[in-house]
Amino acid sequence: MTRPKTLVQLAGREAAPCRLGESALVMIDCQNTYTTGVMRLSGIEAALEEAARLLARARGAGTPIIHVVHDGGPGSAYDLREEIGRIAEAVAPLGEEATVVKTLPNAFAKTDLHERLQALGKTDLIVAGFMTHMCVSSTVRAGFDLGYRSTVVGAAAATRDLPTAAGGIVPAESLHDASLAGLADLFAVVVDKASDLPA
């Protein structure tokens, strides 16, 4: 059986990850929302630990960092005014690191993320966060349409189980892997860990 290839590979193009020193880091929805209750993600502790390692590497490299948070409004699991909606302490912004507030899965939609990245002169993005199948995927795909080149750090992302139309369940790990594979087909380079990123 022939090993499957991505659209990028079929086109004969090279898919190299973005370099930390030439990119902006976009941390998507690393909120307490996903650490507890009905929105708790599978493997969230390990993903946050890897996200913290990624953040430390980016800070050490002088990489511009943009934190994205989702605002679901008062009483929601994404209430930015409450502890549940705040960025997890392990990956909280430091100093003058920017925070972009969104209300849709795509972090470019109705926000100034594109303008901020243009002001930084960055078209290469390193992306991590939650959830893999939702806001990470939506943002990377939208970024592709805007001309950005993204690298997603898989171990610094996570998602949750989802129901199927036939009454079954797609396990979080399978959904995570499938979401990353879908992005790697055309929209992004996917690496496993922060240590896989070139300086």
Image: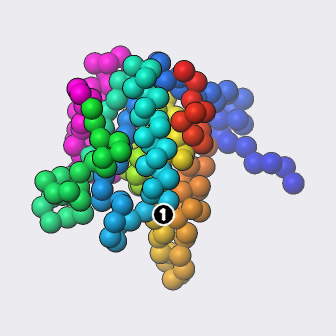
Examine the image and state in which quarter residue 7 appears. Answer: top right
Residue 169 showing in the rendered view: yes
Crowding around mark 1 (Cα neighbors within 10 Å: few <14, some 14 to 19, many 20+) is some
Viewed as shown, does residue 127 lie left or right of 94?
Answer: right
Position of residue 60 measured from the top left corner of the image (x, y, whole percent) = 43, 23
Q: Is residue 158 left or right of residue 146?
A: right
Whether residue 113 appears in this view of the structure is no
Q: How many marks?
A: 1
Residue 100 coordinates in the image, percent (x, y)? 24, 38
Residue 81 is situated, as x and y percent measured from the top left of the image, at 13, 53
The magenta stretch is 95-123
Q: Is residue 106 above or below residue 83?
A: above
Instruction: State the residue position of label 1.
Output: 42
Q: Residue at x 59, y 55 (%)?
A: 177
Front residue (pair 189, 83): 83
Quadrant including the N terminus:
bottom right
Which image quadrant: the C terminus?
top right
The residue under the point 35% across, 48% down is 30
Q: How is the image coloured?
A: rainbow
Report the residue at 39% width, 19% height from top: 62
Residue 132 included in the magenta stretch of the image: no
- Residue 19 versus residue 53 in the image, above or below: above
Q: Is residue 55 left or right of residue 18?
A: left
Magenta-span inclusion, residue 118: yes
Q: Position of residue 91 (x, y in %)?
A: 35, 42
- Farthest bottom residue in view: 167
The type of residue carrying mark 1 is Ser
